[in-house]
Image (cartoon, rainbow, N blue to C red):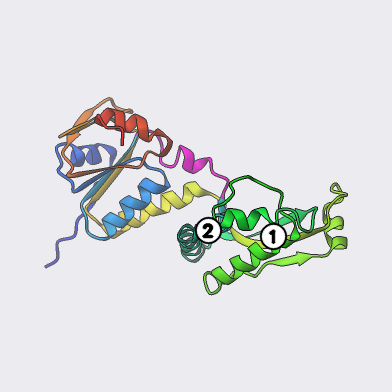
């Protein structure tokens, strides 16, 4: 007979489940990073709990550009591992959440043919950090390299260049435009729904995991103290590992733990 874990469904029951618990991991922060860590641990059988002091996805994860990019701009600095990681994440989202993430065509008007042609390779080899305008030549080289690097990763269309006539028709307010380039990345319509569905994945799995929002971490030590910001209840638990996924608020959380790293 297989014992199936039934996660608590009410807020009071979740607080009861967390109070005095000894989870393997406590994740602090309910944005995209915290939710993703929580999901990966839970679906791999690790007892995990998550606390978010506000609503899920209420901070930086809800205020992003809504672009899901493959790291094109990192190529210029030779950061290939970062590009590969960004592409893998982009393509995973395009595949797993096509109802929320879709291909996005980006159009780049260009008003020069060769500007930046010298600075771009210097940045690539680390000899320059100065920004520069990018003309058609460095843009063409960069997008061609991007296509080559992303070949077989996601199936998005390759880049294309527009003629001067087509570019000027598209950008009549830019009389100096010489041509334009187009390439594809991804766009997420509602990042909050992505985070919500991550939590739903865990809930449907029946994993040994509990996540609760409006639950603020007030002290981190051998025991972690949390305060329910709705009912005022204070609970403690003793996780083996604490993951700080509070993003821009990471230093404040570390301060409560008595650490700066």
Q: Is residue 174 visible?
A: yes
Residue drawn at x 76%, y 58% as measured from the top left = 114
Question: Percent x, y for residue 107?
Answer: 72, 57
Q: Would you call the spot at circle 1 few (<14 residues within 10 Å), some (14-19), or many (20 or more)? A: many
Q: Would you call the spot at circle 2 few (<14 residues within 10 Å), some (14-19), or many (20 or more)? A: some
Query: Can you name the residue that lies furthest to the bottom here?
Result: 152
Q: Is residue 130 above or below residue 255?
A: below
Q: Is residue 199 visible?
A: no
Q: Is residue 250 above or below residue 176?
A: above
Would residue 69 appear left or right of 35 to someone viewing this image? Answer: right
In this orientation, which residue lies closer to the viewer: 99 or 166? 166
For the record, the magenta segment spans 53-66
Q: Is residue 51 magenta?
A: no
Give the quadrant of residue 13. top left
Question: Percent x, y for residue 53?
Answer: 35, 33
Residue drawn at x 74%, y 56% as measured from the top left = 135
In this orientation, which residue lies closer to the viewer: 17 or 139? 139
Real-space CA distance between mark 1 and mark 2, rounded to the nearest whole angstrom? 15 Å
Residue hosting label 1: 139
The circle on residue 148 is none
Residue drawn at x 66%, y 62% as measured from the top left = 183
Q: Quadrant of the N terminus?
A: bottom left
Q: Nearer the viewer, mark 1 or mark 2?
A: 2
Q: Main secondary structure of the magenta part?
A: loop
Give the quadrant of residue 145. bottom right
Q: Is residue 119 above or below residue 2?
A: above
Q: Quadrant of the C terminus?
A: top left
Residue hosting label 2: 78
Would residue 66 appear left or right of 247 to someone viewing this image? Answer: right
């Amino acid at each position: 007979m297989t014992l199936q874990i039934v996660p608590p469904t009410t807020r009071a029951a979740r607080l009861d489940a967390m109070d005095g618990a000894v989870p393997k991991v406590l994740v602090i922060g309910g944005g995209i990073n915290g939710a993703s860590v929580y999901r990966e641990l839970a679906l791999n059988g690790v007892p995990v709990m998550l606390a978010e002091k506000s609503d899920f996805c209420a901070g930086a994860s809800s205020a992003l550009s809504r672009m899901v990019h493959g790291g094109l701009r990192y190529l210029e600095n030779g950061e290939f591992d970062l590009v590969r990681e960004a592409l893998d994440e982009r393509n995973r989202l395009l595949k797993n959440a096509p109802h929320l993430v879709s291909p996005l065509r980006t159009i780049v008007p260009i008003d020069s043919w060769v500007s930046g042609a010298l600075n771009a390779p210097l940045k690539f080899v680390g000899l320059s950090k100065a920004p520069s305008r990018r003309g058609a030549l460095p843009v063409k080289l960069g997008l061609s390299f991007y296509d080559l690097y992303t070949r077989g990763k996601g199936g998005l269309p390759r880049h294309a260049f527009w003629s001067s006539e087509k570019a000027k028709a598209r950008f009549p307010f830019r009389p100096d435009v010489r041509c334009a380039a187009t390439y594809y990345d991804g766009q997420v319509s509602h990042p909050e729904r992505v985070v919500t569905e991550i939590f739903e994945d865990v809930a449907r799995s029946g994993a040994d995991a509990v996540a609760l929002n409006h639950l603020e971490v007030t002290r981190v030590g051998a025991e972690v103290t949390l305060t329910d910001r709705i009912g005022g209840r204070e609970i403690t638990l003793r996780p083996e590992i604490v993951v700080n996924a509070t993003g821009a608020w990471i230093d404040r959380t570390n301060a409560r733990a008595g650490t700066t790293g």
